[in-house]
Each structure stands twice: as C-alpha cells, then as structure tokens.
Image: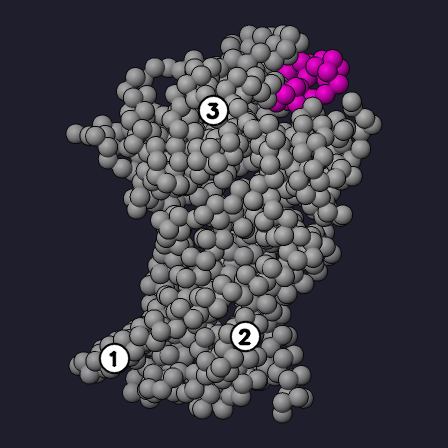
Amino acid sequence: MAGYPMPLAMASPGEVVRIADVRAGRGLTRRLADMGLLPGTVIRIINSQMRGPVVVEVKGTRLALGHGMAHKILVTR
Amino acid sequence: MGKREVLQAKDKSLSHLRTIYGDEAETVIADGRYGFISSLIKETLKKPAVEEVTLSDRVDRVLLNRIVGIPIFLVILYGIFQFVFTLSEPLMDRIDAGFDWLADQAIGISPQWLGSLLGDGVITGVGTVLTFIPPIFLLFMAIAVLEDSGYMARAAFVADRVMHSIGLHGRSFIPMVLGFGCNVPAIMATRTIDNTRDRLATILINPLMSCGGRLPIYALFAAAFFAAHEGIVVFSFYLIGMVLALAVAFLLRKSVLSGPSAHFVMELPSYRLPTLKGTIIHMWERGREFLIRAGTIIFGAVVLIWFLGSMPWGVEYGSEESWIGHIGGVFAPIFEPCGFGDWQAATALIFGFLAKEAVVGTFGVLFAAEEEGLGTVIGAQLGWTPLVAYAFMAFSLVYVPCAATVAMIRRETKSWKWTGFAIGYSLVLGWLVATLIYQIGRLFVG
Amino acid sequence: MAREITIALIGNPNSGKTTVFNNLTGARQHVGNWPGVTVEKKEGSLDYQGYHIRVVDLPGVYSLTAYSLDEVIARNFVVEGKPDVVVDIVDASSLERNLYLTVQLLEMGARVIVALNMMDQADLRGHSIDTPRLSHLLGVPMVPMSANRNRGTAELLREIVNVAEKKTQAKPLKIEYGREVEGEIANLEKLVSQTELSQRYSPRWLAVKLLEEDEDIARKFKE
C-alpha cells in the first residue's frame, strides 16, 4: 500500500497519507511533533493550493502548514 | 560531581539510540507517548466511520481561497469600521456635550486660576479624549469577536502568502491586527513568533498600524474637513498604515534584518460562536488599559500643557507668547514643507509623543476659548485646507510611537538601539510622507 | 478562616481554557507578568463552600518540552509553584492531540484533573467518549464540560476540592518506551538519583527529559 515518498505539497485535497519523514531542524521537528506530526502519523489533506499553505487534519485537529513546510514533510499514499 | 557524569552518560545514550533507531531519541519518545494515547483512544473513543466534510471546512474553502480570501478580509475590516463609527457617533456627541457643559461650569469657579485649570485645562483636555471611549471600546470588542470566533486564525493563514512575499510570517499578522486597537498589547503578542528577526521586524512596524489613540485625531479633522466622507478618509489611514507597515517590513527584511523566514505551523480552531460574556471580558481587559493611560498620562500631560500655556504669569492663555507657544514656535518651521508650520500644531505633536490621544487634548486646551467644533476652529484660526489636514493626519499616523509603546518596544526587544531606531525611522518617514502628500497634493489642488 | 486552595489551569491554545477561567473567576481577575519575563500572568479567585480558591492561568501550550518560553513557564509553575491541583483543559473534539499534554503532566507526577471541555462540539461531530473508562486508564479524575455554556463548572469545583483535600501524592505515569530506550532510561535514572536534583524531580522524569535533549533540564545539570 505504501508508495514512494513525495512532498506533502504534491498531495491533493481529500487524500489520506502517512508521514514518511520530516526533513527539518530539531526545533521545527519538535514543534511538529508537539502538534502531532510524526513519522508514521496518518493525515488527511483538507485544503491545498499551489504555492500556498496546506491545511491538513491530524489526530482530529486542523493544522495550517506554511508553504515551505509542505515541501519538508514527505508522505506516502 | 554526579551531574557531569549524568551529562556524559546522556550523550552516550543519545548516540547509542541514534544508531539503533536511525532517529533522534526524542522522536522515539514522542512516538511512544502518541502510541500510548492511541491505545487509550482505541478503547474509549468512537468516531463516525466517515468524517463528513464539516460546515467549518466548507466555510474555510471560501475564506481561505487564494483569490477571494484577502478581499473578503478587507471587506470584513471595512465593515467593522463602519459598525464602530456609526454606532459610536451619537454616544460621542452626548459625551462631548456633557464635558462642554462641565467645562463651562468649572470656568466660573474662583480663584480664577483654578477655574481656568479645571475648565480650560483638565476637563476640556481629558474630556476630549474620553469622548472616544465608545469607538475604542467597540473596536476592542470587534477584535475580540474576530479572535474568539476563530476567524483570526483564518485571516492569518490568508495573510501568510502576502506576509511571506514581504519576508514576514503569517503569525506576524495577528499582532498587526491587534495594533488597530492598541500597539502596546499588539507588541506583547509578538511573543508567539519564535524567529528573532521576524519578531523584531513585526515589532518595529507595529506602530504604523493605526491604533485607537489616533482615532481622535482622525475623527476630529475628518469631521471638520471632509464631512460626509469621514468613513472613507478614516479608513484610508488604516490602509496607508498597513501599506507602509508592509513596505517597511519588506525593506527591513531585505537589508538590516535579512535572513531565513521561520516556518508557519498553526492550528485552525473550529469556528465558534463567541459568548457575550467572554467578549465583554476581553474587551474590558484591553479597554481598561486604555482608560488608565488616559487617566494618568493624559491628565499629567494636560496639566503640564495648561501650566506651560499660562506662563509667564498674566499672559493670554495659550497664546504664542506663553511658554508653550515658544516651544511650539521652535519646532514649527520644520513642518512648513508639510503644510502645517504652525506652533500650535508643533506643540500638539510634541505632546502626542506622550500619548497619541494627547494631540487632540492639546488642541483642545490651546483653543479652549472657542465653543464650536474644535476641528472647524483649528481650520479657521490656522487657515488649514483639507489637504493640510490630511497631511497632518498622515504625519500623526506615522511619526513616533507613543511613550507607552516605546516602553513596550524596549521591554520586548531588550535593546536601546532598536528602540531608538523605531523612534528615528518613524519620525523621518512621517515627515517624508506628510511632505510628499502636501507638496504633490498642491500641484493638483492648489 | 477559609481554607486556601491554589489551582493552575493548563491546556492547548483553543481548548477553551480562557472560558473556563472566566467561568470560575468572573470579574475577579488580575493580569500581571511572570517575574523576569514579558509573559502575561493571569490570576483570579473565587470563594466556594468555605474555600478561597486562587486560580492561576498558565500559558496555552501543546507540550511541556522546553521549546518555548511559554512551556518553560507552565512547567516551572507546576513544579515550583506547587499548586494544589492542576486542571488540564482538554478539547474533547480533539482528544487524541490534546492528551499529549495530559500525558506529560502525568509523567511529571502532577496532581491533575482533566476537564473534558467542548463536549457539545464532540457530540456534534458524532464522537462518543467512554469517560469513566478513559479516566480509569489514565488514573486521573475527568470532568465533562461545555464551558461555552457554563456547563460542568460546579462539578469541576467539587472535584477540585475533592482532590485538594485528599492530598495524595500522585504516582507518576509510566509509559513503556521500548526496550532500548527503557534500558538507557534505567541507566540514567541510577546516575540521576545520586544528584541533588532527584530531591525535587522524579529521577525517571529527569532521565526521559535528558534523552529528549530538553535544554532547560540540561542547563540544570550544567550548573
């Protein structure tokens, strides 16, 4: 079921994906973990606009991730 | 001591775990916690099989839309201003009349100097400012509703694209909107920005967001010089402030404060109907700050102004020969190119440094002898045209943060250098903007 | 002479903590600053059945790692301020994420009551929570609430007095982190127990924090 990891930015609204990797510095990785985004976590894309922030649902909460972020988080379908 | 051993052991443990897991220990630990929680949830939480697209999401699809999101926000902002001003006008008129009557009664008190102090000075000065309680409180209330309903987060999200192209952060947006109420709590709100440079830039541009203290200035002159177009005129200053703030931020980030921008991660709370009680408490918290400042700083400023306006002994109150006239006279020539090279204007602006509201308070004291609308009086006595009034208001918008804001900037930046910079750049920028408006405007209006 | 109880309110931003605070304290609030920093400190009080309850509102945080000033302040108050009770406001409609903070509080060994807030929102979304079972599994009292409609405040107060009076030293929650990690924890725990810091903090908690590379805790060991 798991496909090849791709940046979160490339997923489409409605898709459910699993986080494969977070390519960020320690501080940011920790902050994302605090909000529930860890490798292995399943998230659902709510809203995604080209070059704009992405809204995902993780553990029952809506998170808005800035542009740069969506490229640092790798997911698999 | 045992402590050092602990630290050494820790480093060994960390590298050991890193080798085994191929990941940092803290990720494994966070994972462990979530795993534990997950097992609890499986046992105790039942969610519907398919989480339907909620109304909240549907609303968001519109409000967060790339193209429509920002215009919607501007419309909402404009709507708020209309609401605030239409509602407060009748109230303001009544309060104004009340203070006028009170001042008249006070002047009759003997000894004469006391009557003057109370009537010309304190009551008129402080009263002019307190007249603005309705719009300022209503503005705080509107901001509270925006926050409590959850819309603020959406607005920040929408603004993030614009912010990012400036080199700022979506998170910088909220302090900017708070700045419309008062710059002091707005600057405190920059705490949530982790990146130092982003935060510094946000703090430095915040005073350009037209705060409640400037409202009296706009209301006064807009009513006198642009009657029937007041709403648009006042709104134009909020817009100018925003545009300048973004422009300055852009320049700062390109030069002095350049560096990578922090990342934007924010929770979008579900939309909520704000409670009346919660909103009122919110509004009261912030409004009370304003009242206390009006009470103390402005009271002090007004007494000081009155004193300077009455000295040397026997001089005609508030005239050019009084001490205050002299002070204003020294600075007046600087404002010639801006169109308002009058000593009264210069004096008012000097006291505006204490608190922006004091500009109006000062005018109120200096022209206390008159009865009609203060704005019209100023226009008549100083020979101002609407263009001059507009340039003056623009200057008031930009120049120098008020004393309380300066104090807050110093507190949050912990640096005299940046505080000084904030004061300096805004003075220069204010002068430039006012001069440009006046000189260019003259070519068209004459 | 009224008995004094001090409680701390903690929870995620947007969990309704402010509403709970307002419901408890009404107009009797006071905003100041946490000493030495520019973070706002909100305090209030109320009288309830002969008790004078002092409520300290801690900053809204997602976690108790020392990533931000807010978290350090919240954490320090729980440890050093020694409130009688820590009320953790949890958004019931976002249960999974909110419990991350709860679990960390329990690992610290704090005396916690979980206020399960926004139950009306959870109901609306079709969530059903087995509160008694969850309370039992976590080993912590849980009070369902809808602070927006001021529902649950009385029950919360009752529970607060209950817990404050019992004065039992809560046993820290222990989460199994996997054999390798647990091995390192045990090792560090032993060394930590020999330092003075183990008087104030649970050795296991310190060990876990060290492995999390918590800057605040590491600093304490460098002094």
Residue B55 drawn at (x, y percent): 56, 44
The residue identified by callout 1 is: B101
In the image, A52: left or right of B433?
A: right
Amino acid type of the residue tagged 3 in the rendering: Ile
Q: Do the residues labelled 3 and 2 touch (CB within 8 Å)?
A: no
> Considering the image in quadrants, where does the N terminus of chain B appear?
top right
In the image, C11: left or right of C187?
A: left
Q: Which of marks 1 and 2 is nearer the N terminus?
A: 1
Magenta-colored span: B10-31
The residue identified by callout 3 is: C129
Q: Residue at x 57, y 72 (%)?
A: B236
Local secondary structure at mark 2: helix
> Considering the image in quadrants, where does the C terminus of chain B appear?
bottom right
Q: Residue at x 22, y 79 (%)?
A: B106
Q: Which residue is drawn at 30% across and 84% down?
A: B313
Up-down: is C181 above or below A35? above
Cα distance in 3D space between marks 1 and 3: 63 Å
Q: Are marks 1 and 2 in contact (CB under 8 Å)?
A: no
* Mark 3 chain: C
Q: Is residue B252 visible?
A: no
